[in-house]
Amino acid sequence: PFLTPAIHLYLQYSPPAGAVALPRPATEESSSKATFLERFLSPTTAYILVACGSCIPLIPVSASVPALGVACLFLLCQAVVYILLMRHIQTGDEKPISFIFALEPTCLRVAAILTLALVIAPKQALSFVSLGMTAIAKAFLWVSFSILVSSSGTSHLWKLLTVFKCSRGHSISASTISTFGISTSQVQFQTSLLRAGGAGLGAVVALWQTFHSIIGLKFSRRIFIVFSLLPLLIFLYKPTISDHPLKWVAGMSDKLDTVSNHPVDELMKSAQQHYQKMVQGQSKTLKEAVREYKRRYNRSPPPNFDIWFEYARANGVILVDEYDVIMETLEPFWGIAPAEIRRRIQSAMKSGKNTKILSIKNHTANGVPNDDWLIEEIKSWLPETLAYLPDVDLILNSLDEPRVVVPRDMLDSIFQHRFTGASSSNVGEPSVSEVTPVHFADTNKQNVWSFATLSCPVDSPSRQPSLTHHSATHMHLHFVRNVTAAKDICSKPEYATTHGFFASPDSFLFTNTLVPIFSQSKLSSFQDILYPSPYYSEGYDLGRYVEEEDVNWEEKHNELYWAGSTTGGHSHEGNWRYQHRQRLVDFVNKKDQDIMLLNETRPGKWVTYHDVMGTMSQLFNVKFTAVLQCDAVDCIEQKAHFHVDDRVEMSQAYGSKFVLDLDGNSFSGRFYRLLGSKCAVLKQTIFREWHDDWIVPWVHYIPVSMGMTELPEIMRYLALTPAGQDRSKRIAEDGRAWAQRALRKEDMQSAFFRLLLEYGRLLNDDRDSLR
């Protein structure tokens, strides 16, 4: 904005030799014929139009692909104006320009061109209408000024035509000088090469028109070159646009072009409302809990539900109604007769590998192997509840990765039987066709995308081969608004090439038979039964978080910290480039990595623009400390590609305000420890866990998408703005407080108690009549 007055003052107070007078509108004497606009518009009406024309730019104009075409139309219309005006210029003659005759046909042409554009692209009606109103208002503004000057005979109003008019960030150029200033200042904020080049070209054209009309030819060449270098230097120096091929198309690079409020503010506000409503809406009495249970699951609670409810209340459990994630994993088994489930359990116990068995018989718990740490940890949850537990056998998955994925046609058949009733009426008979013994296929260290998506609907995006490599190439500024949807494997074909589990899991033994296997985490397309991870509760027992090693928020470094190994998949033949941990470390440490940020162009309006990661590098302390799970060649490649530091203590993370938690081979065992610290936790995961109902994103932690395109902007806003610092500190405090209140060992014991009651009813031949 400073360019306009600077150039204007230079031309006004230091006119070079050979300059002609600034053109001014014709007086009534110079016009032999009054136009319709002159007869219609009185000075009073003109004042009103001037005010309206100044307010019209307040109308928001969306940035989209057709906006580039509209911008070109504006340049064309402005060129028409220049040509019409130039017809009245006679070099060396002091005869003024007859603006009024030039502007009336120009207004009609502008309206006609915009109407034609509206017909061609009706879907962009709002954008075109807004732009059209702005264009027409601008034309009327010029006409009104001309009439005011012609009617009053004063020359003071004419000077306003060469002044840069600005209204809340939107600008109206009243001269070619203003056009040059506006176009030059906008070069650095464009989101594509076409837009930036167009703005620069517009600046040069406006500058040429200015000097051609006002300054002598010999002098204009030197000055023209000097001023033309300004938009060119901004274009070359500002590192906002990379050579990503999609960015050559204006608008294609921005999922989120313009927003009224910063997305983090909106997401936190919405999440807080959801969280408060959830906590306040929990059942206070057994009667309320039973009613809520029936409302959610359309059946009565299992036997001893009243005992569980009193146990939960006595142990201070806050969320007594929020078990939808666990209940969802049990739901398919209602389509299989209890006898058939028991038969499959026995078959899986005989043929299953990498499993452990927990048997509860006559209110006594035993494990195979009995001295295993996982068995021992779970048994430590049971002393107070064994007297109320049914006799059951639990198959515990000892691998990180989930185990059960049922093909879609079989799953649909099972759900159909769930609604028709597979109960005691068909005791001893399978609810679906007779099944073969449970077998586990070993497909580790290879691409498992096709296996992992077998349960997805056949018409889902992830079952379409043409899409699995398509979406990952797009760059959008996408904030995670729905964590459940973000973890939906069936709708995310890009995960095939962005997560190590799909690229090449280090271990993967799975079955296509619906058999109850208890896993600590799973993907949305798998049918494992979720239960609280013993690793979390063991962490409390071992005191993995030591508060004395933590420091207060104000003493922490203003950065995002993560350090770890290359787990997450087995690397071979260069496929480490498609694994999530390697992608993360590469993304944040690559100085010329193209990123998208938000700029507040005016209070309450945020617009996307491009930058490079090098401008944000001080906010990231992300590194590998070990290269594991790789063939020899891939290990060498990764050590050469990444800077691998020495191993560090877990407590080193507490020195940073922001800590990142992300998947390894499956879920991250660090999560509870980090939530309990004084840091704000950012989390990237595609795995579901039992607590997904309990931990609220944007209240207790900050979710990060697999694409990570929003990560730089999240860090810029939270770390570098006063409002962001306040919000990140609140998330750190709320996450820590919630971990201490709702993620205790008692909460996990209560959830497991309820899970066993539900599971015991599923295996009972009289399950439909049990209350």
Image (cartoon, grey):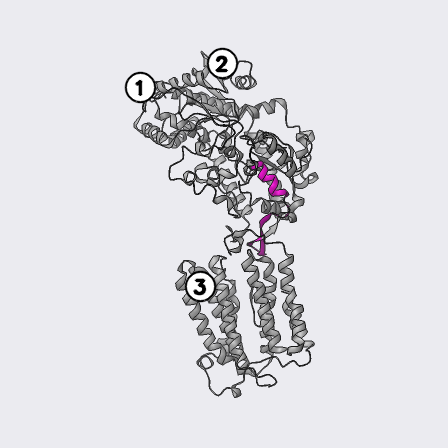
Q: Is residue 320 magenta?
A: no
Task: Judge whether 739 appears above or below 589 on screen.
Answer: above
Would you name the residue on which mark 3 appears?
129
User: SS for tag 2?
Assistant: strand
> Which quadrant, please, contains the C terminus?
top left
Circle 3: element type = helix
Q: Check disc 1 and report its element: helix, strand or loop.
A: loop
Separation (CA) of disc 1 from disc 3: 67 Å
**What stretch of residues is rendered in magenta?**
580-609
**Which mark is on residue 484?**
none
- Give me the residue at 67% from left, 76% from top: 219
**CA neighbours of label 1 inside 10 A, class few (<14), some (14 to 19), many (20+):** some
Mark 1: which amino acid?
Answer: Glu
Q: Reading the chain from its start, which is encountered first: label 2 or label 3?
A: 3
The residue under label 3 is which amino acid type?
Val
Look at the numbered discs 1 and 2 and tell me whether their residues touch, using CB distance below 8 Å. no
**Marks 2/3: CA–CA distance:** 72 Å
Mark 1 or 3, closer to the camera: 1
Label ID, residue 429 = 1
Q: Residues within 10 Å of mark 2 (few under 14, many from 20)?
A: many
Q: Is residue 583 magenta?
A: yes
| Front residue of 31 and 198 | 198
Q: Position of residue 508 (x, y in %)?
A: 49, 27
